[in-house]
């Protein structure tokens, strides 16, 4: 039972956040929309003119957009599949009685705290280098031909690096969820003669459905804008093989200085992200008894 | 009653878990080991794992040749500063939503969350142009502001979920005892809010420290934090593995330690309270 004075104070305390976030969201977005209707290249200042929807036409019909779109889907889809599947397996493993569980958990969670530029460069050089990398040495010692990762399978290389960064996140969330699963519930099922596989399928997995959804949605939002890993390893290449939408927009804006097309692309990215955000906000909202 | 688990089961699970943990952690370990090798040794095949001449010369060279401390200082200022400013803005907001909720609080919270969903690349062009026109490119203050804004939604949300757990009865009780709003804030609520505030600060420092989209696009040298400094090792002439490893180890060590302390809060902060 808030007093009138309390309510006014509350509104006053809330307003800086709202005003700042509103400006932060609306001003750049409005500018992006405006720029996206212009012929505007930073190399020809003062030559801007209205272009209607031409930029969207160019961006969406440009073969590099299709390539980038496909790459984005492949990257996001593969990393999601890898992190969720292995995340479940590792979380189940860590939920077992383990000696030194805390140490193991620290090791598993480690990669999440590594800045993307570090993990990308360490993987690219120390591990994936075709001659002196550790993977090459392992391949040669078991009699295989070492893979030149960034020439032969650049996208796979990026997928592995990004998956390594996000596996801890999935694992940690699923482990947290597993630990909240009532042990008695599981024991009851086992007493009733349920085998461990059916316990997993009918009790554990349904319990994990929500956390898995949350992992997928949050990871997707971050994975759609993977940038630094590509920036320091492949620069989007060879050709367009590792250019995702985020990197394509970056290269149009800051390498080709084509503000109009980059803005149109930016809006396309905003629309894609918003569709996903819609679902995430609904899930979180359902959980919020404010 | 917990059943006793068979010893064999414990042993299998322990061995498997340690192997998995070691494999996942290995790239970090390998980087740290490489940072103590000479450049020549770093390239050697077969690689030496423990039995080589350990040296700390890379750490000295990294500082001498590339002014590591300058970039570390930038990281500290940008990550720390953006967190502090975000806290100053967010604490009152989260406070009021947790303690004086209105009919619209839920919608406001969800709207705040939705601002975090905006992909940074969607507003790269205008932000870059605004920065150029205001001479903010490659300045610490510019990066500090951007990171503050981009993390503000997470900060508000985390604080809100913590504040919400503070029992409201305690307020009533202190009011009955005649405490004023000011005394209530200082003596009753603040002590109960400190753990939540501390976790929020830690998580936000980690996020800002590792942020690598705005920092890479908006800074080059003067204001460049460690993310950008490490990225400079991607150029062909910069491929000195031992030095890359030494610089990387220095860049991640403090945050890895912080991160390990905050792993529980991490789940909460990054899922916006959807998983606890």
Image: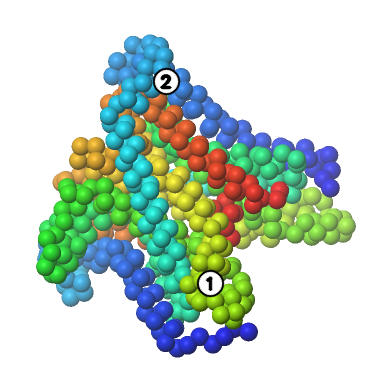
Q: Which residue: 19% across, 52% down? A: A149
Q: Which residue: 75% across, 41% down? A: B102
Camera-near label (1 vs 2) is 1
* Residue A231 occupies quadrant: top left
Whole-percent x and y of residue A80? 40, 52
**Along the horizontal axis of the image, is B199 left or right of B175?**
left
- Mark 1, chain letter? A
Specify whether residue A238 is in view: yes
Q: What residue does disc 2 label?
A: A35
* Residue A90 occupies quadrant: bottom left
Whole-percent x and y of residue A272? 45, 36
Q: What residue does disc 1 label?
A: A199
Residue A175 is labelled as none
Q: Which residue: 35% across, 41% down? A: A72
Colouring of the image: rainbow
**Along the horizontal axis of the image, is B58 left or right of A32?**
left
């Amino acid at each position: 039972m808030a007093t009138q004075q309390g309510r006014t104070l509350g509104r006053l305390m809330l307003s800086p956040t709202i005003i700042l976030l509103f400006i932060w969201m609306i001003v750049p977005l409005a500018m992006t929309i405006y720029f996206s209707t212009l012929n505007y290249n930073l190399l020809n200042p003062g030559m801007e003119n209205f272009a209607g929807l031409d930029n969207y036409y160019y961006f969406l019909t440009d073969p590099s957009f299709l390539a980038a779109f496909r790459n984005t889907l492949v990257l996001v889809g593969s990393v999601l599949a890898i992190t969720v599947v292995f995340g479940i397996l590792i979380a189940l493993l860590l939920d077992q009685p383990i000696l030194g569980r805390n140490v193991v958990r620290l090791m598993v969670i480690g990669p999440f705290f590594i800045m993307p530029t570090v993990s990308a460069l360490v993987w690219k050089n120390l591990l994936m280098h075709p001659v002196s990398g550790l993977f090459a040495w392992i391949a040669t010692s078991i009699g295989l031909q070492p893979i030149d990762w960034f020439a032969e399978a650049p996208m796979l290389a990026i997928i592995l690096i990004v998956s390594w960064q996000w596996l801890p996140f999935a694992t940690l969330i699923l482990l947290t969820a597993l630990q909240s699963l009532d042990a008695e519930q599981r024991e009851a099922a086992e007493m009733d003669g349920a085998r461990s596989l059916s316990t997993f399928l009918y009790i554990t997995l349904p319990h994990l459905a929500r956390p898995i959804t949350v992992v997928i949605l949050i990871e997707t939002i971050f994975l759609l804008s993977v940038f630094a890993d590509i920036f320091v390893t492949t620069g989007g290449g060879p050709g367009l093989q590792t250019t995702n939408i985020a990197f394509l927009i970056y290269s149009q804006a800051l390498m080709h200085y084509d503000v109009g097309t980059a803005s149109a692309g930016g809006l396309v990215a905003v629309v894609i992200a918003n569709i996903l955000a819609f679902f995430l906000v609904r899930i979180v909202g359902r959980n919020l008894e404010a | 009653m917990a059943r006793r688990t068979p010893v064999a089961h414990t042993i299998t699970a322990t061995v498997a878990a340690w192997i998995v943990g070691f494999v996942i952690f290995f790239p970090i370990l390998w980087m740290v080991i490489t940072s103590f090798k000479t450049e020549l040794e770093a390239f050697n095949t077969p690689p030496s794992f423990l039995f080589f001449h350990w040296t700390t010369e890379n750490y000295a060279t990294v500082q001498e040749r590339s002014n590591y401390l300058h970039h570390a200082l930038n990281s500290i200022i940008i990550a720390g500063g953006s967190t502090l400013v975000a806290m100053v803005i967010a604490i009152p907001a989260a406070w009021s939503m947790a303690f004086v909720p209105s009919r619209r609080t839920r919608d406001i919270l969800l709207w705040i969350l939705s601002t975090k969903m905006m992909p940074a690349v969607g507003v790269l062009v205008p932000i870059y142009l605004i920065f150029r026109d205001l001479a903010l490119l490659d300045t610490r203050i510019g990066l500090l502001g951007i990171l503050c804004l981009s993390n503000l939604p997470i900060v508000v949300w985390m604080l809100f979920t913590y504040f919400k757990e503070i029992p409201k009865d305690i307020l009533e009780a202190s009011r009955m005892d005649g405490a004023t709003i000011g005394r209530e804030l200082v003596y009753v609520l603040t002590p109960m809010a400190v753990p939540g505030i501390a976790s929020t600060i830690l998580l936000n420092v980690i996020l800002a420290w590792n942020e690598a989209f705005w920092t890479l696009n908006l800074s080059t040298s003067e204001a460049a934090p460690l993310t950008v400094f490490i990225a400079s090792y991607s150029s062909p002439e910069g491929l000195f593995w031992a030095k890359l490893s030494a610089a990387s180890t220095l860049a991640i060590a403090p945050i890895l330690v912080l991160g390990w302390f905050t792993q529980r809060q991490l789940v909460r902060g990054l899922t916006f309270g959807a998983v606890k």
